[in-house]
Amino acid sequence: MTTTPEKPSMGELQEREHGIGHDYAKGSPHIRHHAIRDRLIGDLHALVREVIERNGQCHVLELGAGHGTFTDHLLAAGARVTVTEMSEPSVRFLRNRFQRNPNVTVLHDEDGTAACRTGRPDAVVCVSVLHHIPDYLGAVKELVDRIVPGGAFLSAQDPLWYPRRSRLSMSLDRNAYFAWRLGQGQLRRGLATRLRRLRGVYDEANEADMVEYHVVRHGVDEEALRALLVPEFAEVEIRRYWSTQSGLLQSVGDRFCPPSTFGLVARNRR
Ligand SMILES: C[S@@+](CC[C@H](N)C(=O)[O-])C[C@H]1O[C@@H](n2cnc3c(N)ncnc32)[C@H](O)[C@@H]1O
């Protein structure tokens, strides 16, 4: 990994945030809340089933697998999975977890190029990953170019593009997050982050500004992704939903709040 003291690499920053003993579930609504998690698991099973029906097999490339929470479900659905991770401690965890499973290959993706070492997958899965990648449109284009005909692309749990959202939507989302942070006893960190965001200041050496790259900037442009995927797949579906960290605010928001987050599935690669 190449680094300079002033500007750490993305791999280094991801490692700082997702280091040894990192708890992926703690701040992740898609793992914490059963309604979001169960829907995602259902989508993963459906995707693998569909691809197997069409292509007779399903080799999934799962980007940024964390500790493999969703890898298990891809395997249970019948896929062979190549997982990538930028954080070295998470790579070690994954290698240990799946060491006896011949259907899992773990790649350490230090610089975001591991996809080129996987051959051509039948499907690509990115759960809560695109918002970490500065050039996510370029990355998705490269990934999609590798998917074989009949294959699929699924992404989940990214923040909707902020410029298209109403003030009310943004404010409900931000305040729900802030309330959750207060509940964690992290008033000082919450306030410091809020002030930096209000000033629009980003520090390239600070993992709080760099790791959740698009969460702290403008969100992820779901319509630009759709435009990129539509010519390549027979069907593209975007699902928008409310998502926040606190269990109570999640159940209230499910009924009353505008969507904050999206997932998408693209089926049947041309
Ligand atoms: C929010 S976590 C999600 C982990 C897992 N997918 C889940 O939902 O439990 C994002 C993960 O993506 C990894 N990551 C970020 N950018 C990446 C990239 N370009 N290639 C591979 N992994 C990446 C980070 O190290 C981190 O573990």
Image (spheres, rainbow, N blue to C red):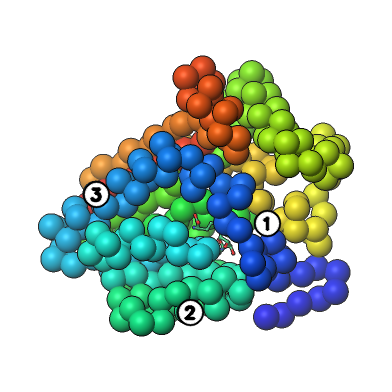
- Counting residues from the start of the chain, the first of labels 3 and 1 encountered is 3
Q: Find disc 2 in the rendering and name its residue.
A: 96
Residue 241, image x and y in percent? 46, 31
Q: Is residue 220 above or below residue 198?
A: below
Query: In this rendering, would 144 be left or right of 65?
Result: left
Which quadrant does the N terminus fall into? bottom right
* Disc 2 and disc 3 in contact, CB within 8 angstroms: no
Q: Is residue 107 above or below residue 13?
A: below
Mark 1 and ligand 1: say if the CB distance to the nearest ligand atom is below 8 Å: yes
Q: Nearer the viewer, mark 1 or mark 2?
A: 2
Q: Nearer the viewer, mark 3 or mark 1?
A: 3
Occupied quadrant, residue 194: top right
Q: Find disc 1 in the rendering and name its residue.
A: 211
- Label 2 crowd (10 A; few <14 / some 14-19 / many >=20): few
Q: Give me the residue at 45% from left, 56% from top.
A: 126
Residue 234, image x and y in percent? 23, 45
In this orientation, which residue lies closer to the viewer: 168 or 254? 254
Q: Give me the residue at 30% from left, 76% from top.
A: 103
Residue 201, image x and y in percent? 83, 45
In this orientation, which residue lies closer to the viewer: 196 or 67? 67
Residue 68 visible to an observer of this rendering: yes
**Mark 3 is on which residue type?**
Ala
Residue 222 visible to an observer of this rendering: no
**Mark 1 is on which residue type?**
Val
Occupied quadrant, residue 238: top left
Q: Nearer the viewer, mark 2 or mark 3?
A: 2
Disc 3 versus disc 1: distance between alpha carbons?
Answer: 30 Å
Q: Find disc 3 in the rendering and name its residue.
A: 46
Label of residue 72 in the image? none
Q: Is residue 189 above or below residue 152?
A: above
In this orientation, which residue lies closer to the viewer: 101 or 202? 101
